[in-house]
Image (tube, helix red, strand yellow):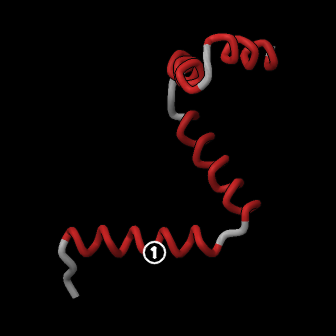
Amino acid sequence: MALTQTQLTQLIETYAERIVDDMDTKTLMCFVFDAIVENLSMQSEEEVISEIASMYDDETADELIASVN
């Protein structure tokens, strides 16, 4: 069976939706946490701090840095 790129994209999205729908809140939160950690682990220190500051603000970034020092 050969799917078109559009069909493959639809299949992937439908499958992902089914997986998410079948997750309870705790499992979904763990999945999201792991994805965020994995994504940020591939970035430099400067990129991580910039991400935090852009998502929240510089003060929050400073507070989080202080919490690990």
Q: Position of residue 30 (x, y in %)?
A: 71, 54
52 relative position to 63: left or right: left
Q: Residue furthest bottom?
A: 1
Using the rendered view, name the quadrant where residue 8 is placed.
bottom left
Q: In what element is the residue under mark 1?
A: helix
- In the rendered image, residue 48, in percent from the top left (x then y), is placed at 56, 23
In this rendered view, identify the residue nearer to me: 45 or 28.
28
Q: Residue at x 72, y 68 (%)?
A: 24
45 or 3, which lies in front? Answer: 3
Report which quarter residue 12 is drawn in.
bottom left
Q: Residue 20, relative to residue 45: is it above or below?
A: below
Residue visible at 64% across and 56% down in the picture: 31
Q: Residue at x 59, y 42 (%)?
A: 36
Q: Is residue 10 above or below residue 69?
A: below
Q: Give the percent coordinates (x, y) of residue 47.
A: 50, 21
Where's the N terminus, which quadrant? bottom left
Question: What amino acid type should be assigned to the residue bearing mark 1?
Answer: Tyr
- Residue on which disc 1 sits: 15
Quadrant for the C terminus, please: top right
